Image (cartoon, rainbow, N blue to C red):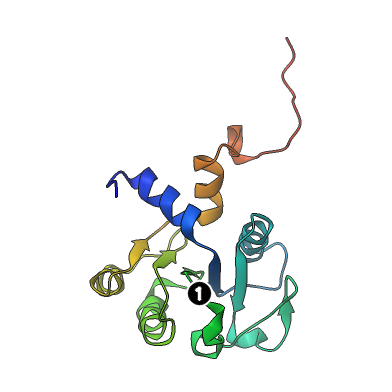
Amino acid sequence: MSTDPDDVLRDILKTTRVIAVVGVSPNPVRPSYYVARYLGLKGYTVIPVNPGHAGEEILGRQVHADLASIPKDAHVDMVDIFRRSDAVPGIVEEALRELPGLRTVWMQIGVRHEDAAARARAAGLRVVQNRCPKIEYQRLFGELRMGGFATGVISAKL
């Protein structure tokens, strides 16, 4: 596989099918909500994880309290972390213990933890830090426009 960062990101986004979004909010104006919604619209199965909303539904899917409560037959490929950086080690350890098919740990913009990233890499996982899968999908697959908005409206006139 290529070591070019864009090739790695592209491969992750093309091969991932099921994403556990840790820290997703039911509030539609929160980034975690609209990122999860976007990923669902792109065909990914999104599994919401948030202990404060366990048992409720977000985006039509049951919210799980933690990664351990996700059914083993869900086959989670990627964990997308919307939590503070200091929460990452516990999430990575739980993911390694509870999600046998996991291939990627993705930390959202502003989220980094080098020790947890090294632990995940040592276990054979791909790790992305301080990036958003929605933005990267848009950037890599031609949906990101000037200002970061894909409005679908052509405003330029000749």
82 displayed left or right of 153 = left
Give the class, few, some or many, for how many residues have Cα within 10 Å of label 1's Cα (few <14, many ≥20): many
Q: Residue at x 60, y 75 (%)?
A: 47
* Image side of residue 148 versus residue 152, left or right: left
**Residue under pointer 1:** 76
State the image coordinates of residue 58 (x, y, percent, origin top left): 71, 75
Side (left or right) of 121 relative to 43: left
Tally the numbered discs: 1
Q: Residue furthest top?
A: 158
Q: Identify the image quadrant of the C terminus.
A: top right
- What x and y, as percent, mark residue 137? 53, 48
Percent position of residue 81, x then y: 48, 70
Relative vertical location of residue 28 with respect to residue 88 in this rendering, above or below? above
User: Is residue 74 or residue 117 the one in the foreground?
Assistant: 74
Q: At 49% from the left edge and 54% from the top edge, which residue is drawn?
A: 13
Residue 69 placement (x, y as % from top left): 55, 90
Q: Where 143 falls versus 119 (above or below)? A: above
Q: Which residue is nearer to you in this view: 47 or 56?
A: 47
**The disc labelled 1 sits on which kind of residue?**
Val
The secondary structure type at the circle numbered 1 is loop
Residue drawn at (37%, 45%) of the image: 7
Give the residue drawn at x 49%, y 73%: 83
